[in-house]
Image (cartoon, rainbow, N blue to C red):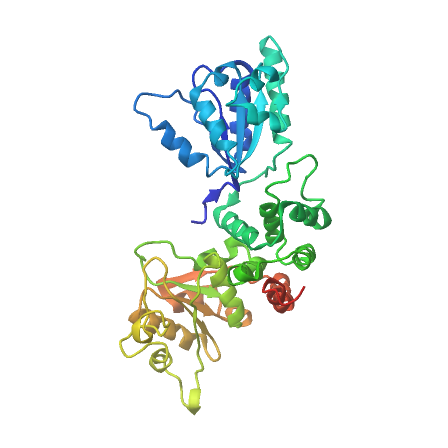
Amino acid sequence: MDDQTSPMWNVFISHSTNGTDGVARHVLEKLVEVLRPTYGVNADLKSIQPGDDWEGWIRKSLPESHVVIVLLDSRAQASDWVKQEVSWATDPRSTSKVIPVLIDVPKKVIEAMWEFRALLKLQVIEAQKVSGAAAVEAEADRLCDRVLSRLYTFSTALHEEDVVLARRLARGFKLNEAEADDLLARHFGDVCDRNGKYPFFTKELLAKVVLDDHLGERAMAAIRDAAFDSDLARHTRPIVLSSWLTWPEAQPIRVDDSPLPGPRAPVLLTDDPLIAEQYVARAYGCTLSEITVKHLDPEADGEPDTPVRAVDSLFGPSGYLKCGLGPDNTCEQHDRYPKHVLVGVVGSVELSTRVVTEIHRRCPLTVVVLMIPPEEFSRLGKERVKDLVGAAYRPIQEVDATRSERFYSKKDEIGEIVCGRRR
């Protein structure tokens, strides 16, 4: 999971697959190369073969595309497939944005063809007539630059988790594209080149830069000025709150193996369960609703709190965790998405690690996040902690003090704004 990247948006390039050459072929190849990794590019470069489910591929790819680029040369103009693609892309019910590129096809020819007439209502990019290999290459570069000038691109690939969170946060905004664009100009004008860009994707772009700022001053200013859909607050609020963390920081807590190869005990250097909960939430893209928290007190009721006694309070009579998801307050455990228990240290780390072992003895699918104060971890040393935890040990990098302080100072305000209690 930690190496998976994902495009922010999808683009469909409509063109003739039979014999596309000259400027159109160069434009097609350059766009496919340059648009990645910001866009997932749907552009079949091979000819249609007997038996190909071409219509099925188009029907799947077009609705998933945020942008449709139409490369209309003389061959594409005569293609029934391109006509069908343009018809679907320009349908009033389509949400795709269409960028038409006319290559050696005069506008008056397009006006005479009802299949393409809708393209002339859009801002058309027209090629210049050229001859010679060098001129063809230069004209293709010019057309690509014109197309790309209307679209946002990122220099590096985005992690799949970041793309998902940005899209979900964008849905939580109660903004139109122009309002989102205004917020981008006010708060992120120096990091977002919006000059000449089409006014779409702005909500997703606003969400991305807000999350990238990790609850910094610009992110908070944009959050204060934005409007949120209070009906989606339970989805949006945890995304904003956990944005002080990055995916690599929280990733060691994530479990994607199925079945789970063995017990997991990530070690987090904090004594604060609220910080630990944030790590778990961010690790799972803010989708977990149940986190069981257990704090160990070695001297509860004046007696040593043995590991068995400490863990007894976690489990019901049938031996299941008391998460309340199953019947009779039992746990519906799953090997792909295990429950998480946060074990804190009040006394000795040694006793706490015995609690971790006892939990795993009863339920090896439970991910136990062991919270150790940084000074205690330093006193024992990494190797000693690894020996105590055993094979379940998973290291987590040190908590960023500056960003965690942002979370604490802003969490109440964020809750009020996102839930619509303060405007």
Q: Position of residue 151 (x, y in %)?
A: 61, 35
Q: Position of residue 341 (x, y in %)?
A: 41, 70
Q: Is residue 380 above or below residue 25?
A: below
Residue at 46% across, 65% down: 267
**Considering depth in this image, is 363 or 8 the residue closer to the camera?**
8
- The percent coordinates of residue 289 (x first, y second) are 44, 65
Q: Which percent across, then down, holds residue 322?
A: 35, 74
Is there any visible trace of residue 404 in the rendered image?
A: yes
Horizontal placement of 385 versus 246: left or right?
left
Quarter of the image with the C terminus in it: bottom right
Count of picture labels: 0
Q: Residue at x 53, y 17 (%)?
A: 73
Q: Is residue 398 visible?
A: no
Position of residue 333 relative to residue 3, above or below, is: below
Q: Residue lying at the far left in this picture: please name it.
A: 318
Residue occupying image coordinates x 56% and y 18%? 110
Quarter of the image for residue 49 reads: top left
Q: Quadrant of residue 130?
A: top right
In the orientation shown, which residue stands out farthest toward the bottom? Answer: 302
Q: Is residue 375 above or below residue 255?
A: below
Position of 48 with respect to 87 (left or right) is: left
